[in-house]
Image (cartoon, helix red, strand yellow):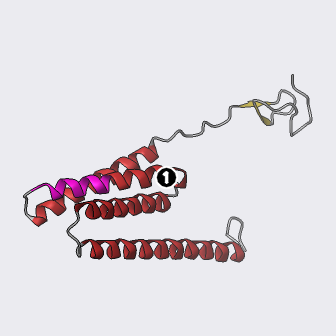
């Protein structure tokens, strides 16, 4: 084995973790879209406008949750679910009160959900990035040390 070449065990573990991630997202997405289809199918059997608003809010909430899991930003899960639900309800309200053709109504909905995804993704990029710790150099041995270190890890010199 050459220097810098990954060990076989590391490669296998890495592949297993990737497969698990793909399976997890596939199952989550399949169940979520299946649920969204079920809700949409049920909504088509009723004329109640509140049921349509609730259904699209649920579909939007699922879209927000999927976005949080897909991007690894589970800390924002609740906010994204709530925002998705609001976007879903607003989009349904806007298309239900319009007299436009169905293709134009779906375009309006697509634009709203696209704007939601675009804004959410742009917020991910603007999250605070951790600043690297400022390092110093030990006067005795030249070893790099952190700002809050009391001893040098290279030579054991104590700092004030």
Q: In the picture, residue 140 is in which quadrant?
A: top right
Give the residue drawn at x 60%, y 75%.
Answer: 15
Name the secondary structure under disc 1: helix
Q: For mark 1, does the 10 Å Cα neighbourhood hold few (<14), some (14 to 19), or many (20 or more) residues?
A: some
Residue at the extreme front of the image, as rendered: 48
Q: Check residue 5 for magenta coloring.
A: no
Q: Check residue 95 for magenta coloring.
A: yes
Q: Position of residue 95 (x, y in %)?
A: 17, 57
Q: In the picture, residue 56 is in which quadrant?
A: bottom left
**Image check: 154 left or right of 41?**
right
| Quadrant (top left, top right, bottom left, bottom right) of the N terminus | bottom right
Question: Which stretch appears magenta?
Answer: 87-98
Say how many tags the image has: 1
Would residue 114 be seen by someone viewing this image from the given angle? no
Give the residue drawn at x 7%, y 58%.
Answer: 99
Give the residue drawn at x 72%, y 66%.
Answer: 3
**Image check: 113 left or right of 152?**
left
User: Residue 102 or 133: which is nearer the viewer?
Assistant: 102
User: Residue 96 or 31: which is nearer the viewer?
Assistant: 96
Residue at the extreme top of the image, as rendered: 160
User: Residue 86 or 17: which is nearer the viewer?
Assistant: 86
Q: Position of residue 144 (x, y in %)?
A: 77, 36
Give the residue drawn at x 39%, y 74%.
Answer: 35
Q: Position of residue 65 (x, y in %)?
A: 45, 60
Query: Residue beneath label 1, please?
Result: 78
Would residue 139 be seen by someone viewing this image from the given angle? yes
Q: What secondary structure predominates along the stretch shown in magenta?
A: helix
Q: Position of residue 24 (x, y in %)?
A: 53, 73
| Quadrant (top left, top right, bottom left, bottom right) of the C terminus | top right
């Amino acid at each position: 084995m050459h220097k810098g070449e990954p060990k076989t065990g590391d490669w296998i573990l890495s592949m297993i973790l990737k497969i698990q991630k793909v399976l997890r997202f596939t199952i989550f997405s399949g169940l979520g879209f299946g649920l969204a289809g079920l809700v949409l199918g049920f909504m088509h059997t009723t004329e109640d406008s509140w049921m349509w608003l609730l259904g699209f809010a649920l579909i939007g909430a699922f879209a927000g949750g999927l976005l949080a899991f897909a991007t690894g930003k589970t800390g924002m899960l609740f906010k994204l679910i709530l925002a998705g639900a609001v976007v879903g309800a607003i989009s349904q309200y806007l298309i239900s009160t319009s007299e436009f053709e169905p293709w134009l109504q779906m375009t309006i909905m697509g634009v709203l959900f696209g704007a939601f995804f675009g804004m959410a993704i742009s917020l991910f990029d603007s999250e605070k990035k951790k600043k690297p710790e400022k390092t110093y150099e030990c006067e005795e041995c030249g070893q790099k040390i952190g700002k809050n270190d009391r001893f040098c890890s290279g030579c054991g010199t104590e700092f004030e």
